[in-house]
């Protein structure tokens, strides 16, 4: 943990946990802590990805993220609370997507290979890893969409049955993120990664830890918190299980 990028990432991870504890201790501050957690997690993902993948691959990962239209996600529009826009889309939205996709990518690697970094393999394996990542991030979206809607970041024209969100919106999350992961993983198989330093167990588990911290921070919201705790908990448990199996297998060798 001697590299400056990892030190900064660890500091941001600790700060995120601190904000989560603050949220749990004083639920009335959730709107404040939530706004602080977003830039904290974004910077964490950028720094950690730069270390794990290399600057160029992290940039390419970011370039593969995008924003889908209402055709998939439903009829909604962004408010002015997210700042400047390019057309109808706030410029911060691709950053939020990257913030969410990178930890989900690492968790998918842990579930699929027991390690945070892994060979992409053949098309079938890439499809499987991409699907794992898509399901992991969609579990997170179960919290993001209703919470951000309640904060007024975006507005649904038609009210849905899931805390005001249309259910087919989550099908859009799966399809869109699966496509992004699939395209990126194909590219990564071709060019490889260029980690800046050694990838240790602690290094690899930093993104899942911040993912888990985000799940806990939603726990203060009645009804929604229980759903998110279990939805985001399943990918984490699967990652823990596969990592443990990989460690035991390595010890036996």
Image (tube, rainbow, N blue to C red):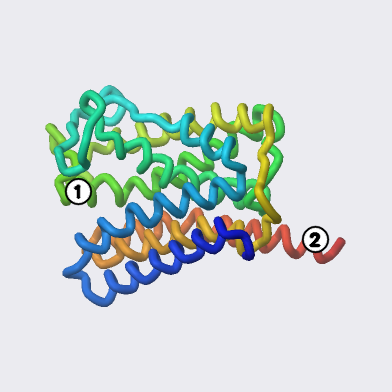
Q: Residue at x 66, y 53 (%)?
A: 115
Q: Position of residue 45 (x, y in %)?
A: 47, 50
Q: Nearer the viewer, residue 193 or 25?
A: 193
Mark number, residue 179 = none
Q: Residue at x 73, y 63 (%)?
A: 247
The image quadrant of residue 94 is top left
The image quadrant of residue 4 is bottom right
Q: Residue at x 27, y 38 (%)?
A: 167
Q: Position of residue 248 (x, y in %)?
A: 75, 64
Mark number, residue 250 = 2
Q: Position of residue 246 (x, y in %)?
A: 72, 58
- Looking at this rendering, what residue extends furthest in the right direction? 253
Mark 1 = which residue? 163
Horizontal side of 47 relative to 189 (left or right) equals left
The image quadrant of residue 251 is bottom right
Q: Position of residue 173 (x, y in %)?
A: 37, 36
Q: Are marks 2 and 1 in contact (CB under 8 Å)?
A: no
């Amino acid at each position: 943990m001697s590299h400056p990028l990892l030190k900064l990432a660890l500091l941001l991870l600790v700060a995120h946990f601190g904000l989560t504890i603050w949220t749990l201790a004083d639920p009335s501050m959730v709107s404040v802590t939530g706004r602080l957690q977003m830039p904290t997690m974004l910077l964490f993902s950028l720094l950690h990805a730069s270390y794990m993948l290399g600057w160029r691959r992290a940039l390419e990962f970011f370039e593969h993220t995008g924003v889908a239209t209402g055709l998939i996600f439903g009829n909604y529009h962004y408010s002015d609370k997210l700042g400047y826009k390019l057309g109808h889309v706030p410029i911060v939205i691709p950053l939020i997507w990257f913030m969410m996709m990178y930890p989900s990518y690492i968790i998918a690697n842990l579930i699929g290979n027991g390690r945070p970094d892994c060979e992409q393999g053949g098309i079938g394996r890439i499809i499987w890893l991409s699907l794992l990542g898509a399901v992991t991030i969609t579990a997170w979206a179960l919290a993001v969409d209703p919470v951000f809607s309640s904060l007024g970041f975006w507005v649904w024209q038609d009210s849905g049955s899931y805390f005001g969100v249309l259910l087919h919106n989550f099908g859009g999350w799966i399809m869109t993120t699966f496509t992004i992961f699939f395209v990126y993983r194909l590219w990564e198989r071709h060019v490889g990664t260029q980690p800046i330093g050694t990838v240790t167990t602690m290094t690899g588990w930093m993104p899942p830890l911040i993912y888990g911290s985000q799940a806990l921070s939603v726990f203060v919201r009645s009804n929604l918190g229980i759903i998110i705790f279990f939805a985001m908990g399943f990918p984490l448990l699967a990652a823990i299980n596969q990592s443990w199996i990989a460690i035991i297998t390595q010890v036996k060798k």
